[in-house]
Image (spheres, grey):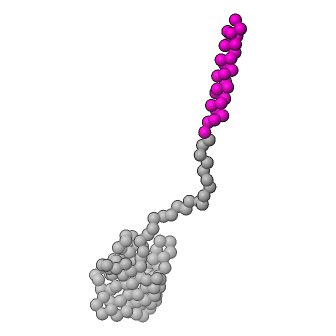
Amino acid sequence: MARIRFARYAVPVLLSLLLAACAAIRPEPPRVMPGPPKVLRSPARPSVEGSWTSPEGATVSQLRHGVFTTVAADSRARLASGNYEIKDGMVEISGYSMVRQSPLAIRCLHVAPNQMNCTNSDGKQFVLRRAQGGV
């Protein structure tokens, strides 16, 4: 009879101890080491630097290191010059037109790697295409 009492109490006690031991040796989740904050970057935009031509090929515009120049494709005579900068995704060109002998202001949207849609200060719209082999 003593054996039955022992078995009746011993089995639940041993099971409780076994479960407690399993819970105590449960592996800890891996610790995440703090690191520098991740910076989400937008995809890189193609550069506007390089040579751009008018649709009919009469002019060639150069955009290099913030400097803008336009020359006649046939004679290479300078037609306009100035500066450009990129603001809010727009290419803003300001300078002087030798043809009109007046200041110029042009805003272009770089819509594709090889195309910019532009509007001058008079509201005239035109397209510039990247010159063949130009970057």
In the figure, residue 67 lies in which quadrant? bottom left
Seen at 34% across and 77% down, the residue is 130
Q: Quadrant of the N terminus?
A: top right
Q: Is residue 87 among what the camera can see? A: yes
Seen at 61% across and 48% down, the residue is 31
Seen at 32% across and 89% down, the residue is 72
Question: Whole-percent x and y of residue 48?
Answer: 41, 76
Q: Is residue 119 among what the camera can see? A: no
**On screen, residue 21 above or below 38:** above
Question: Whole-percent x and y of residue 121?
Answer: 44, 82
| Residue nearest the observer in this picture, 92 or 36 | 36
Seen at 55% across and 62% down, the residue is 39
| Residue nearest the observer in this picture, 125 or 112 | 112
Question: Whole-percent x and y of residue 11?
Answer: 65, 17
Q: Which residues are magenta?
A: 1-27
* 39 left or right of 133 in image: right
Residue 12 among magenta residues? yes
Residue 49 among magenta residues? no
Q: Main secondary structure of the magenta part?
A: helix
Question: Whole-percent x and y of residue 99?
Answer: 38, 92
In the figure, residue 108 lies in which quadrant? bottom left
| Residue nearest the observer in this picture, 105 or 124 | 105
